Every structure is written in structure tokens, then in C-alpha cells.
Amino acid sequence: MTKKKQGPKSHFTNTPAPAQRELTVYSNGFAVVQEWRKLDLSKGLNQVLIDGMPHTYFANSLMLFEYTGEGDLTVVQRSLRPANLTPDALLSKSVGQDITIRLHSGGGKQSTIKGELLAYSGNKLIVKLANGRTWMGNATDDMELGELPQGLTNNSALDVEVDATTTGVYQAKLLYFAGGLQWNAFHQAVYDEKAGLLRRFNCEVGVLNNSGTVFGQAQLKLLAGDIGMQDAHREVMFMAASAPAGGRAAKSRQQSFESVGEHKLYPVDGKVSLTHGENKEIPLFAATDVPVEQEYYLPYGVARQHGSEDEALEPVSVKLKLVNNAESRLGKPLPAGRVSIFQLDSSGSPQFTGAAQLGHIADGERFELSLGTSGDIKAERCLLSFEEDQPEQKRPEPPRPLRPLGGPDVGKPRNPHDLLRHDVISGEESEEEEKPLYRTEVRAVNIHNFKSDREVSVTVHDEFPAQAEVKVEGEHKFEGKSQTAQFARVTVPSKGKVTLKYTVRYRVR
């Protein structure tokens, strides 16, 4: 009987903790992990167990990016082993090893059982003692075993089969994706309305690790922008405390940035450790005395017919207009995130007065921050009157029909003028076209300024049908790049009211 030929056996090796690790976290809820691992390999096939992998490792994402060593390496296959270190698994894998069991009884008495673990089932142990006898009893809370058996880990591990052409020590740079990691930017602004400045404009980031593993002393980088990966994160909210009035604001580190393709990358200075479940708060940058322009504006809305029961004043919206450049004491890409806006009360204490959502802002870009609505500036839109009319139209003369002239060219056009009318059928009267219908509306916007200390300028937005004729009464005027969406600026004195009245005429059909 011939023996079945067996394939070559794999050399088993555990990799130590990574000597160097880089973590690039994306706001979409995942990260790219790069780490240098030491591989002690034999020539031929090696079974390499990469311990400490995140539970949220993305299948098929491992890449052997580069390596140093004498020979050539080829990754044959790999598989993810979930965390499997449990008391049952440890006892089952420890059969054949030495075991020490301490039995405690009443009165503080203790006895010790030492020997070789022969079998384990349920909660029962069978141990071969040194004198050759066999002991059987229950597992206790006080037992001692030898070294941790191979294949057991309290973290997920990646089992990689590597083919090496030469025995030796290799330094391999591995790259893989992991979920459960994300970052969010949080901005804080302290607005001084009288000075027209943001006395402080800070950005901090919260980095959340729910990957199931610890990333110790890693180089952390944050990449901003949508790269097409599906969101896999949950919202993280926190707010940094503001400096007390009259005190000095704590300085924040000014992190650098760089462009990677169409996205912005923010490397964090120094090394960062992230334990599982931790939300690390990291200052990104801070600016002071940023100039802003405040604007009151009334967004487009439907006018109520004058005299209707639902007439009511609506609050006017408020926003801050900024420029992200060096002249405005900014001048670096701003990551998207929530902006918490504070204003100082009469005692100098900051009060939270608004929240805005900021998109990704490029260096040199103009942007706005919404402050919500004003309690002192209000307005009402009114439709004062409307009418519809159908103006008389002069009916065009129908084209002359072609007539045959006789001879061999009967029915054929003789000149270009006739050629253009070749398909006109003689003697048929065209149907009468429907008259166009026009609508004329008289609209008014009443703006009230209940402030007693100053006048305000309000920007009124409205939308008009294409090719509409708009006539404004008085000194005001509508302007804008679009013919259908325009705005007018109205100055309202303190404790006063101003009416913007205009007529709109447009074709209905």
C-alpha cells in the first residue's frame, strides 16, 4: 500500500506588536491602517498570525505594501480569526499541559492539585497527578496553566500564509481598512457684534474608536471630504468650554494640512493612542479677531393676500459673511462640521446663541454662518391685488399656396421662394391660436425694526417667473445675477417701518 504524498508543512509564527503605526481616519466612518510588522520567516510556506486586528477589519482589504529582507515574499492566502480566548477554549486547548488547581474550604484552608490536564468537559476536569493517580473534580476560580496555547487570542487576528524564498527576518509594511473609526470637526465662534469680529474661532476634532482594538502611539491623520464610501458612523457631539470673560483664552496647537488628490489631509502632531470606545478630542487650529459682516435677510416666501385672517409678522433671518483668507486671519482649508456660536452678555459671559452647519471651505472661499432669526426685526409679505388680461393680437397673414403652372414642370417649385412654401396646402384655413394670458400682481413687504438703538439694513429676496416685468415704487430696486431670483436692500430706522412695494407682470400661458 503506497502512502499518500503530503504537501509541505507551514512554519507557524506570531508577529510582535507593530513597531510603527499610521492611522488615517475618514469622516465616513472608517480608517486606513498602515503598520510595520516584524516577520521571522523560514524558507517556504509560513503561517503568520497577525494579532491585535480590529474586529471591524474590512475583508479582502489587506495589502503587503512593501517589505525589506533578503528574499522575496508572496502572500498565498489569508483568513480572519475572530477573538476566541474564552475559559472553555483555554481549557480545551490546554489538554496535555500542566495545571495547578487551588481548592479553598471553610476556615481559610487550602489544598492544591497539580498534574497534567487529561480531559475537560463542561465544568469537570480530569488531571493525572505526579504519583500516577487520577483526580477528577470541578473547575474553580483559582487555576494556573502554562503558556497561552497557539491560536487563542483576545483580539481578532489575521491568519496569513506567506511564501518566502529565503529564511530570515523581514520588516513588512501592511495596509488594511477598518470600520468603527471616524472623526468629526466642531467649530466654536465667539461673536462681538459691535466690533464686527469673531473674537475667537476655534476648530477641534473628535476621533472615535469603536473598532474593538487599541491603537497605541500611532501617527494620526484626518482626511476630509466625500470619497464615495458609504457612511458607517454615528453622530458624536461635544462642546468645548469657552474662556471666562476677561481671562486669556488657552492657546491651541495649529495643525498643518496638505492636499491629497481632491481632498485635504490634516496630520496631527505627535503620537496618539486610541483605546476602544474612546473619543479623543484634539485641537486643530484657533484664530482670533476674524472680521465678519452681519446681514439681516428675508428669504423668499409666498405672499399672503392682503386682509386674510392668517396675516402675521415673521422673523427676519440673520447670518454672518466671512472670507477664508489670510487677511481675515484664517487662510487654511476648514473641515465641514457643526459651528457653535457664542455672544457675550452684559457681564461679559459667553452665551450660546446659535448653531450653524459648515461645509468644506477652501482657502480663499467666501462662506456664511447662520445665526437663526432676529427677535427685533420682523416682516410680512402681502399680495395687495392681482388681475389677469388677454391683450388683442394681430393675426398673421397666411402664406400663399403653390399653384401648378402647366407644362412638364407641373407641381415643381420654380424659384427659392416657392421652394420654401412647397408643402403648403392650398385652401385650408388654420385654426385660431389661443390668446396669451397675463397676470399683474401688486406685492408689498412691510419690514419692522423694533430695535431702539440703531437702524438696520434688510436684504429682501423674491423669485419671479421668467421674462417677468418688475417695477418698484420709490428708491428701492431689485438686483441679482439671475432674472428669476433677485433681492432688494431696504434700510429701516430704529422703531420704524418701511414698505417695499412693487408690481410684477408675467405671462401665465
Image (tube, grey):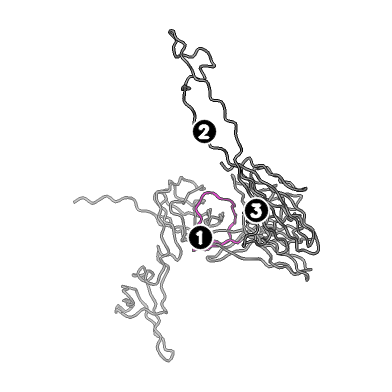
SS class of the residue under badge 2? loop
Residue occupied by mark 3: 383
Query: What residue is disc 1 on?
Result: 180
**Residue 37 x, y percent position in the rendering:** 51, 55
> In the rendered image of this protein, does residue 109 appear above or below residue 481?
below
The quarter holding residue 344 reads bottom right
Mark 2 and mark 3 lie on one chain; the one further toward the N terminus is 3
Which of marks 1 and 2 precedes in the sequence?
1
Residue type at tag 2: Glu
Q: Secondary structure at mark 3?
A: strand
Amino acid type of the residue tagged 3 in the rendering: Leu
Residue 348 pos. (x, y %): 77, 69
Rounded to the nearest angstrom, the CA distance separating label 3 from label 1 is 54 Å
Q: Position of residue 208 (x, y in %)?
A: 56, 62
SS at badge 1: loop
Q: Nearer the viewer, mark 2 or mark 3?
A: 2
Residue 279 figure quarter: bottom right
Q: Nearer the viewer, mark 2 or mark 1?
A: 2
